[in-house]
Image: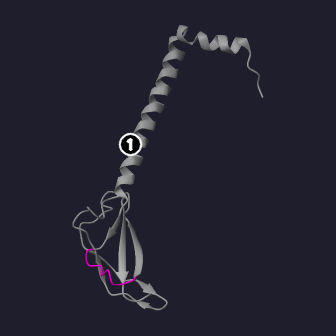
């Protein structure tokens, strides 16, 4: 490893005397802090978008629960405003067709993840 000498510290204290080097360091720090703030804001925005949607037509008496994740693409037009239906297939059976919808959430937008809770009478 390189050792730190008093000459290295002297170079740091002379940084304000060189306007180009000083401007470069300030610009890099500003870009870094801006990127950190923007990415932190996007992370918080993504956290609020992740919710488990309990389908309105779920029957509380049905004891078999399944979580369904639908991801949409990042490309332009990667979402949909159409109706989305699923049929779950398992080793022990097939579910009825279920529509994935919610009156409270906007669903299937571009670059989104929608989690749904489906209650079924029988195990799959």
The scheme the figure's colours follow is one colour
Furthest residue to the front?
61
Residue 118 drawn at (x, y percent): 36, 77
Which stretch appears magenta? Answer: 56-63
Above or below, 6 against 48 in this view is above
- Kindly state the secondary structure of the residue where label 1 is placed: helix
Quadrant of the rendered image containing residue 11 = top right
Left or right: where 47 falls relative to 8: left
Work out which quarter of the rendered image holds the N terminus and state it: top right
Residue 12: image x %, image y %? 61, 14
Reading the image, the residue beneath label 1 is 41
Query: Of all residues shown, which one is farthest toward the left?
Result: 103
Which of the 4 image quarters holds residue 59?
A: bottom left
Q: Residue at x 47, y 24 (%)?
A: 27
Q: Quadrant of the C terminus?
A: bottom left
Q: Is 52 in front, or is 61? A: 61
Residue at 41% in and 37% down: 37
Numbered disc total: 1
Q: Main secondary structure of the magenta part?
A: loop
Taking the magenta stretch, the answer to whether it contains residue 61 is yes
> With respect to residue 93, does 100 lie above or below?
above
């Amino acid at each position: 490893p390189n050792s730190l000498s008093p000459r290295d510290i002297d170079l740091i204290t002379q940084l304000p005397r060189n306007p180009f080097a000083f401007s470069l360091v300030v610009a890099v720090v500003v870009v870094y802090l801006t990127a950190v703030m923007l990415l932190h804001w996007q992370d918080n925005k993504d956290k609020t978008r992740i919710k488990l949607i309990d389908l309105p037509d779920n029957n509380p008496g049905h004891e078999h629960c399944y979580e369904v994740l639908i991801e949409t693409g990042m490309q332009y037009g990667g979402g949909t405003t159409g109706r989305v239906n699923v049929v779950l297939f398992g080793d022990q059976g097939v579910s009825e067709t279920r529509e994935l919808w919610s009156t409270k959430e906007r669903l299937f937008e571009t670059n989104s993840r929608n989690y749904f809770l489906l209650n079924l009478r029988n195990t799959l």
